[in-house]
Image (cartoon, coloured by chain):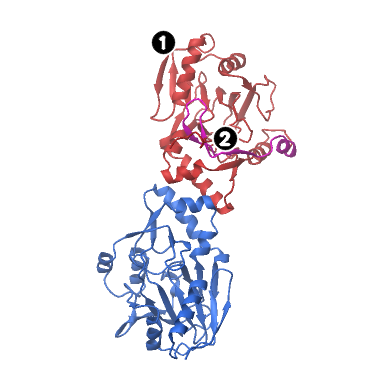
Chain colours: A red, B blue
Amino acid sequence: MTIEIQSLTAVIGAEVRGVDLATELSDINVRLLRGALLENLVLVFRDQDLTPESHIAVARAFGEIKHPPVATAHGGPPEINVLDQTEPRGEGADAWHADNTYTSAPPMGSLLRVLQLPGVGGDTAFASMYAAYEALSPVMRELCDELTAVHDVTRSIVKAIARGHSTANLAEIQAKFPPVEHPVVIVHPETGRRALFVNVNSTARIVGLREEESDMLLRFLFEHTKSPEFQVRVKWDERSLVFLDNRCTQHYAVADYHERRVLHRVAIEGKPPVGIDHASASS
Amino acid sequence: MTQRFSSERLSLHIGAELKGIDLAAALDADDVSAIREQLREHHVLFFRDQQVDAEALKTLARHFGSIDVHAFGRHLEGDPEVGLLDQTKPEKDGANRWHTDSTFMPQPPFGTILAAVTLPDIGGDTSWASNHAAYDRLSPQIQEMLCKLSATHDVSGPLLRAVAGGHSVGSIDEVRAQWPPISHPVVCRHPETGRPMLFVNSNFTTHINGIPEAESAALLKFLFEHIRTPELQVRFRWQEGSVVLWDNRCTQHYASADYQERRIMHRVTIAGSWAPN
């Protein structure tokens, strides 16, 4: 059976059919799907029959598994981060973000599988940070190209603890993940394309700017990310798996349900984000 | 005969009170050059206890340049060179927004002389802010970005407010036809000192050119907030006999709309010969 890849928007997202991830992950298919991910940023696989074990195995075909930096309370395999929500509003996933950018090497990508869905709602939207960058004016790009920002775990972990999604101790988490600095614009290590790399959950401030300037710029960039032109919105079903490139996308879990919704996430190790190399960049 | 005066700074970045000078008396070349020097350094000069009528204001203004007739503001009957600010309910008149005067012109005024005629018992202060200090206070990255940009200045907003408030002469269509929207750099250099300064204001600057609207809106909102920083400002409490002379190019001002009694001021505007650059 041939693998069909169908784009969902002009800039992000493709639906993948014709491959059974549990049984057909040949080297050729892995290479093909990796190429499809780089091109489409988010792959939506339908009609999959996966278990926690095969979910992990699929992720491992694309890289080393990255264990959740802050473990969720569940009894399953340690590779899996369980997202189990009933009243999701304000819990943090309903804000545009890339995962774990408060770490020095955020995941390269994540594979998301849904186990339980509300009757209606609970979509996830994804945004291309390439498109977000490219939609900025040249003057704004030049400004952002030069800047770095501090990413901090505090904001998201405080929410997680308050809502009972983490039993971690705030001070311990803060000590384990001290604030890190990443470029505001990163160069994707595989495609070489530039992507905006600030998000409302973890980016606390821009380095070297006055507080008011940093606030202005971050507020603008966070708003900018919300443009529908950069986005695709995925409707889940129980046989779907989504593979996202965490380096050049952000996502938003739509908090429009009051029934239980359970997702499993397996993340793949990433490298520290790298900004524009001005020494070798020719412009 | 050359007058002797002393100068007292009123804040770190802007404003000085000149004492011992009689503006109604003849000013010689040395006086004028000394006042010019003070203006270059302090941008806004305050004089107390003066006795200057409309004619004396015009004589004073002519020491610094020719007199500009305001594009649409009211003036003394029979004398368009002396602007008349006559307000009782000032909230919606537009002077209680930070602005540089007439930046919709290709060559905005050099400066303005304002004299108190009738004052409310309390309130009606005017504040000025330094466009130089506003620029200096930005971080180098933001300065560098702003130096690449220009912005559009449009008479329409303040004009419509002035007409609605009964403070305008002339027709909207004619004024707009005479002063179509114009572009000035966001950062200019003072023509005399060469110092860089921010050159956008909330009355006339409608958008930054050549960038998406959302970027323009974010930057202008920030810059209009920025000018509200008290460290950039000086505030003056008017008294009978108070006269203020300011450099319009490197300052913005704001008339506090905190009175309900009549407040009358005479304004003489000194024409500019500098196209912002």
Report the residue marked by disc 2.
A93
| Percent position of residue B205, x then y | 39, 60
User: Label 2 crowding class (10 Å Cα cut-off): few <14, some 14-19, many 20+?
Assistant: many
User: Label 1 crowding class (10 Å Cα cut-off): few <14, some 14-19, many 20+?
Assistant: few
Dot 2: chain letter: A
* Residue at 52 percent of width and 26 percent of height: A244
Q: Amino acid at mark 1?
A: Thr
Residue toward you, A115 or B258: B258
Report the residue marked by disc 1.
A2
* Residue at 44 percent of width and 33 percent of height: A231
Q: Is residue A75 left or right of residue B127?
A: right
| Percent position of residue B8, x then y | 58, 79
Residue range highlighted in magenta: A170-198
Quadrant where the N terminus of chain A sits is: top left
Q: Amino acid at mark 2?
A: Ala
In the image, is residue A37 above or below residue B59? Answer: above
| Percent position of residue B38, x then y | 51, 76
* Residue at 36 percent of width and 49 percent of height: B210
| Percent position of residue A22, x then y | 54, 11
